[in-house]
Amino acid sequence: MEYFSAFIVFVCGEIAGLLFFPILTHYLGPQNVSAWNIKAILKGVLERLVLFTALLHDYPQILIAFAALKLGTRLHHEEGSDISNTYFLLGNLMSIFIAIVAAIIAKKIWA
């Protein structure tokens, strides 16, 4: 039952993300890019699921690994990129925030 409630909390966080990220893409994202890119959405859901699961089980070190992975992939694709640093930073911070808040809420429900 605990994991079912955690799943519901995670899904609610993803719904919030589906509302926020298209707005972010519209105002700060690259020109002529759809906010509803299924690959980007699924990648974001997977990222937040990994963060959420690790935080739920008291492994905050995942934040360091997440930052290293994001930085490494960002540096690799930096040349010729249309993605602004502000867009990249806000998107990642919001993704982390959603996962952290969802983990906190799920833990409160478990208590």
Image (cartoon, helix red, strand yellow):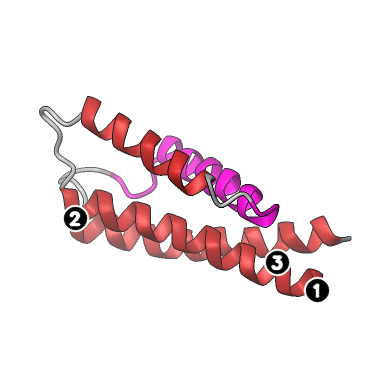
Mark 1 is on which residue type?
Ala
Q: Main secondary structure of the magenta part?
A: helix
What residue did someone put label 3 on? 106
Residue displayed at 19% across by 55% down: 86
What residue did someone put label 1 on? 111
| x, y percent for residue 62 | 53, 44
Q: Any magenta on residue 101?
A: no
Classify mark 1: helix, strand or loop. Answer: loop
Residue 81 - label: none
Query: Could you tell me how far apart the alpha carbons at marks 2 and 3 are, in whole angstroms?
Result: 30 Å
Classify mark 3: helix, strand or loop. Answer: helix
Instruction: Report the front residue among 4 and 110.
Output: 110
| Residue stretch in magenta | 34-58
Q: Any magenta on residue 55?
A: yes
| x, y percent for residue 46 | 55, 41
As drawn, is 99 to the left or to the right of 72?
right
Mark 3 is on which residue type?
Ala
Q: Quadrant of the C terminus?
A: bottom right
Q: Quadrant of the N terminus?
A: bottom right
Mark 2 is on which residue type?
Thr
Q: Are marks 3 and 1 in contact (CB under 8 Å)?
A: no
Mark 2 surroundings within 10 Å by alpha-carbon count, few (fewer than 14), some (14 through 19), many (20 or more): few
As drawn, is 91 to the left or to the right of 52?
left
Classify mark 2: helix, strand or loop. Answer: helix
Residue displayed at 46% across by 39% down: 65
Residue 65 seen in the current view: yes
Residue furthest to the right in view is: 1
First in sequence, mark 3 or 1: give its number. Answer: 3
The quarter holding residue 39 reads top left
As drawn, is 49 to the left or to the right of 7?
left
What residue did someone put label 2 on? 86
